Amino acid sequence: MEKFLSNLLHEQLKDLPRVFLVKKIEKKIEDAGVTKNVTEIAEALSKHLLSGGKGDFNWDDGSNAHKSIDLTFTEKDTEDIEKSVKSFLKDDLPDILTSTVSEIASNQLKTAKKEWPQYHIWERGQHQIFKDNLELRWGKGLNLLRLLLSETLQIGQLKLDALLRSKAKKNIRKREVLLMLHLRAAQTTAEIITLIENGYADGAMARWRTLYELRIVAGLVEKFGDEIAVKYLDHEHVTTKREMDNEIRHSGSEDIDPDHVKVVNDNFAEVINLYGNSFASPYGWAAETLNKKKPTFQDLEISVGLPELPPNYKMASYRVHAGVAGLVSGLGILGEGTIPIAGASNAGLQMPAINTAYTLVQFTGLLFGNLNRMADQLHVAAIVKLRDEIETEFVKAARKLERDEMKIQRSS
């Protein structure tokens, strides 16, 4: 379509001098007293002149009448035609193009909307076939991962019930925050499973990055207790203040309720006065505990005994940010030198699945504290065993996929 329109426009622009020549001839013919077939005569005469025709030009209108007229073209006529062409190109053509493009786009969109329901049914059917094949290959591991999520949710519910019954005054805020974080971790895991089920390994890995960050935060809360848990919750006022300031920068303050602005600013001032200026940094809730003015995420990792920016976390970041690494690599690509894909893939699903299983088990383990109770030990042992089975099944499926791909490549 684009090439067709470009060629059509090119042909029309080439014809512009003739079009304005016809208009000039029409005017001269009318001035000579001709009233019939003016446009037809002008069209024919323009072709005669532009083809290099010499001598008299004859026009037969079917009547027996004979009339001769003389048309004189001066240098000014040529200049007028050139000016008309230039004026059209400068003033009229842009509006015509805009109008034409808008009309064609509207027609294309109308056609696309009309055809979309039928195509969508076909597309959805193709994706369901893909999902069924994915389930055949990865189903054992996927079902175990689904089971792990269900088990950890049940554990979270047991811990919540215990908290609601508890009369203890120590570590209440710590337990509350850990359970809140665990709920979000469960939701993130459900999102990861949905992405894996649909063949989006890189998207699942990007969501695992969030799960990993939640696990780091939970590790700090579990390690340092109520004090840091309260600061973590109070840090909401810093985030809200940052969001409001950003909205004002982009949209102005006219549409924001002045009372809301005052409440946000007052709450921010209160926590800064309580915890100090370092509290305003992104991880300011951990500043005093870690003795850092502006702690980084790497500081958080180190404080809970985990390696700084592990390779999987760095790789997951590639698909979150807009760097070139996210363009030239991907978990869903089998082999080397393959063109990056735009849709779902049956490959690479083992990495987000295994990482999710390990992180979710680590996270859930934080809910148990020191594991003094036999029941807690049994829960942890069960989900650790389940995690190991998940890893085994996904590794087996990934190796089989590689073997199958090698067979296909050899046969082709």
Image: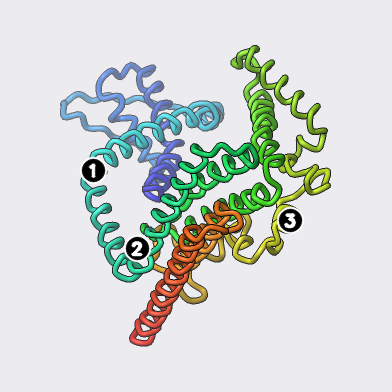
Residue receiving disc 1: 117
Would you call the spot at circle 3 few (<14 residues within 10 Å), some (14-19), or many (20 or more)?
some
Residue contact between numbered discs 1 and 2, judged by CB atoms under 8 Å: no
Question: Which quadrant would residue 395 be assigned to in this image?
Answer: bottom left
Image spot of residue 14 (x, y percent):
44, 42
Image spot of residue 201 (x, y percent):
46, 61
Image spot of residue 315 (x, y percent):
60, 63
Distance from disc 1 to disc 3, alpha carbons, whole Å, reads: 54 Å
**Near-viewer residue (165 or 289):** 165
Q: How is the image coloured?
A: rainbow
**Near-viewer residue (94 or 400):** 400
Q: Is residue 333 visible?
A: no
Residue receiving disc 3: 303
Question: Could you tell me the amino acid type at mark 3?
Answer: Ser
Q: Left or right of 338: which side holds 302?
A: right
Residue occupying image coordinates x 29% and y 57%: 127
Residue receiving disc 2: 143
Query: In the rendered view, would you say 354 is above or below 76?
Result: below
